[in-house]
Structures are given as structure tokens and as C-alpha cells.
Image (cartoon, rainbow, N blue to C red):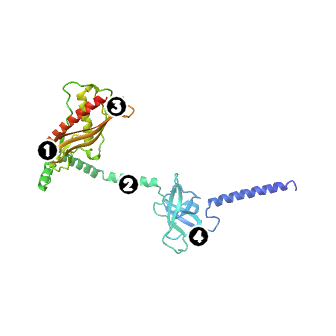
Amino acid sequence: METRAPFVIVGAFVLAAIAATFGFVYWLHNSTGMGARSTYYLQFDGPVPGLLVGASVLFNGIRVGEVTELKLATDHPRRVNATIAVAATTPVRADTKVGLEFQGLTGVPVVALEGGKEIAPSGNVPTLIAEPGAGQSMTQAARDALRRVDSILAENAEPLQGMIANFRTFSDGLARNTGKLDSIVAGLERMTGASTPPPKTIYNLQAAAAPASPGKPLKGQLVVAEPTTVVMFDTQRILFSPANDSPEFANSQWADTIPRLLQSRLIQSFENYDIAHAPLRNADGAEVDYQLLIDIREFLVAGGAQPAAKIAFSARLLNKQGKVVAAKVFSAGQPVEKVEPSAVVAAFDKAFAEIARELIAWTVQTL
């Protein structure tokens, strides 16, 4: 007896531990605990893909029990009968809705119960009938939708082909009668008093001409950056001070914005002076010795008793290290003989030629 007693105690301890483990696993799996259960029968009129005995039962998204039995109805080939056990306090009523939900990435099916409108208990609820298509997954629903679309297209293939042919005929007719349509639209515009605005007249700025005799050549590689200015001068309009609302100038503009136009014509003027050492527009891929920075102060027609085209800007020369080696303000003005676009542009050409020659001479002397 003394030698067997320890073995009996150890065996009893092992059995108790095994029983406790099974009890813990059962408690963990059954979130509703060991309390009273109510059994309900479910009827699905269709497949329940992936549903297994032991699957969870949710009521309004909360787990209340599990599936205890699944079987096929012998009297109905498409019907599936299921038995569930849920917590006795679960408010299952006669109008409770039944369906399947597919949870997680793998789409594990669970029975989903949704509370109805009945508040008071409805007595014995022996069987809950699931809604039609309750067991249909998203994949199956997509397949059915595509199948229906395919059947609709197949049934209406001939009308669709006729519609496409009509569109083709209509578009061909439009293409053949484009000229007539344009004349119709023009007639409607004339009839309604609408008028097409006249096209813009584009004016360019003339660069300074080459000197009569070659001068001192430029030294080093120079870059003329795009001039900076205030927003008012960053435009293609011919500016006036005060403003000029004449229709002639409303439909007239420079060939480019004033900063880009000035940069282009300054480089062209340097080329006319010394093409071999003319400056570049930018420093991409080139070794630069000097950089010419321009800031526009005036580029407009000043009104008054004698209107004049005025150009003014500051210029700074920077060396390789970015240090300013020279700076100066340049300005020029030419009277406008007549306030009309061609006369105004001619005055700007004269003013620019004067200021460009002065800038080139100063740059050559500084370098």
C-alpha cells in the first residue's frame, strides 16, 4: 500500500489536470459560459458554403452560441437544416432575421442573427427561416451579377449593334457636313448679335543692331538670367500708366512675357555685338565666369502731354563665387508720335536699342 499510494495520487492529479484543461478549453470556446442554453432550428433554402458544426452564432454582432448540428432536408433537395444553441437570455423572436456572414481574410462563415421589431417574447420559436440567398458569398454574388449582365448583353446584342451603327452613321454625317455646320453656327451668331473677337495682333521687340565697327570683345563666359520683376510686368500686354482702354491695345500684345522678351532681345543684342563671345541663356552644362542679373523697373508707356515709351532696369554682374563685381541702373525713354500700337512699338524699339547699347558697353568695360 505504501508503494502504490504515490502512484494513485499522481494518477489522480494527472486526471484532474486533464479535466481542468478540457474545461478551460470549453469555457474559452464558449463565450457564453456554462449557463442555460436555448435551442433553435434554422432553415436555409440554399447552400451554406463552408458552414461547420461548432461555427459561431452572432446576435447583432455579439457571439451568443454555436452551431450544434447540420443536416440535409430529405424532403427538399435544396434545403439545409441547422440547429444552434445560444444563451437563454438572447432575445430571439419570431421576426429575427437569419443569415450567414463571412469573416476574416479566409471568409470563415458564421451564423448571423439580427433582432427584429418585436420587443416582448413571442413564445415558442421552433424554426427560424433564413432569407433567400442568405448563404451567398460576395464571390458568388459577383458571379451571379456578371452572369445576369452577360445574359442581358446576349439578349440585346442585335439592338446594341444597331445603336452603334446609328452612332457611326451620325458621326460620319457630322464629318461630311462640318462646313455647313460652321456656316449655321455663324448665321446663328449673326442672328443673335454675337460676334467673334478679332484675333490678337502680336508685336516683337527689335534687338540692338551691330555696331558700325567691331568693338572690344567680351571676356569670359557670361550668362544672362531671366529678369525678375513685379507681377504687373509679368505679362504680354502693352502697359500704360494710366491705363489705356483702347480696343486697339486690348487686341495687341507682345510676342512673349516682358521678362522673357527682354532676356531674349538682350542676348540677341550681345550676339550682334560679338557673336563669338555672346552670353548664354542659362548655365546648364557650361562653365560660367560671370552672371548678369536684371530686375525690371519700368516697361510701359507713360501718359501725359507727350506720351513716352520707358524702359528701366537694374543690372548686377556676379563672378563665379556669386559676389557682385558691378551694378548699375539703366533707363531710356522715347516719345510716342501717335498713341497707336505700331507707333508705340516703334518707340519701344528705339528705347530698347539705346538701353541695350549702354548695357553692352558697361558690361564690356567691367569684364
Amino acid under label 1? Glu
The numbered mark at residue 89 is 4
Q: Quarter of the image containing the N terminus?
A: bottom right
Q: CA distance from mark 3 to mark 4?
A: 90 Å
Above/below status of 334 relative to 186: above
Q: Is residue 74 above or below residue 231?
A: below
| Image height of 140 relative to 124, above or below | above
- Residue at which label 3 appears: 290
> Which numbered circle lies on residue 220?
none
Q: Looking at the image, is mark 3 or mark 1 nearer the viewer?
A: 3
Counting from the top left corner in percent of width and height, residue 108 is at 53, 55
**Residue at (74, 58) in percent of width and height:** 16
3D distance between C-alphas at marks 3 and 1: 40 Å
Other residues around mark 1 within 10 Å, as few (<14) / some (14–19) / many (≥20): few
Q: Position of residue 240 (x, y in %)?
A: 20, 47
Q: Earlier in the sequence, mark 4 or mark 2?
A: 4
Q: Who comes first in sequence, dot 1 or dot 4?
A: 4
Q: Quick one: SS at disc 4?
A: loop
Depth-wise, is mark 1 or mark 4 nearer the camera?
Answer: 1
Find disc 1 in the rendering and name its residue.
340
Q: Amino acid at mark 3?
A: Tyr
Kindly report which numbered mark, 3 or 4, lies closer to the viewer in this rendering.
3
- Element type at mark 3: strand
The mark that comes first in sequence, 3 or 4, is 4
Q: Nearer the viewer, mark 4 or mark 2?
A: 4
Q: What kind of residue is marked 4? A: Thr
Res 215 → quadrant:
top left
Q: Earlier in the sequence, mark 3 or mark 1?
A: 3
Question: Residue placed at 23% from the left, 49% from the top?
Answer: 167
Count neighbours of disc 4 (C-alpha within 10 A) and say few if under 14, some if 14 to 19, many if 20 or more: few
Task: For marks 1 and 2, give the CA distance.
Answer: 72 Å
